Amino acid sequence: MNKEYGPDADEHLPEEVLAAIESGTPPLAAVRRWKQLSVEQLAGRSGVSVATIEGAEAGRELSPEAQVNLAWVLGVGADLFHE
């Protein structure tokens, strides 16, 4: 794993997370909930604003930098957050 890209997007994700994503839950929300982090906790650890995280969970696109920062904190590949 390298800091910029992390592991493959769905590598090591449990079936319930993959199922949630397949059923329409935004990947960021599914992984954040699996990791048991609030939006505020994730924002504090990643340096990405609460508003940006909430927007991404509502369907807005993340900047590449935000994708990498969130992926690094959550331990997933940044490509999971890219549509």
Image: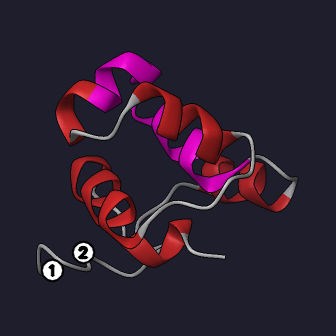
- Asked if the magenta segment contains residue 62, the reply would be no
Mark toward the start of the polypeptide (1 vs 2): 1
Which color scheme is applied? secondary structure
Secondary structure mainly formed by the magenta segment: helix
Which residue sits at x=66%, y=47%?
A: 16
User: What residue would you read off at disc 2?
Assistant: 6
- Residue 27 at x, y percent in the picture: 62, 54
Which residue sits at x=49%, y=40%?
A: 52
Instruction: Name the residue type under label 2.
Output: Gly
Question: Residues in magenta?
Answer: 26-43
Image side of residue 83 versus residue 46, left or right: right
Does 56 sit above or below residue 61? above
Quadrant where the C terminus is found in the figure = bottom right
Which residue sits at x=38%, y=72%?
A: 64
Crowd band around label 1 with a 10 angstrom C-alpha radius: few (<14), some (14–19), many (20+): few
Does 18 sit above or below residue 78? above
Which residue sits at x=63%, y=39%?
A: 55
Instruction: Name the residue type under label 1.
Output: Met
Q: Seen from this angle, which residue lies furthest right?
A: 23
Does 13 sit above or below residue 58? below
Label 1 secondary element: loop
Along the viewing direction, whichever of 6 and 82 lies nearer the viewer: 82
Q: Are marks 1 and 2 in contact (CB under 8 Å)?
A: yes
- Residue 54 at x, y percent in the picture: 59, 32
Label 2 secondary element: loop
- Residue 3 at x, y percent in the picture: 12, 73
User: Spatial distance from mark 1 to mark 2, Cα to Cα?
Assistant: 5 Å
User: What residue would you read off at disc 1?
Assistant: 1
- In the figure, residue 82 lies in which quadrant? bottom right
Quadrant where the N terminus is found in the figure = bottom left
Image side of residue 63 versus residue 47, left or right: right
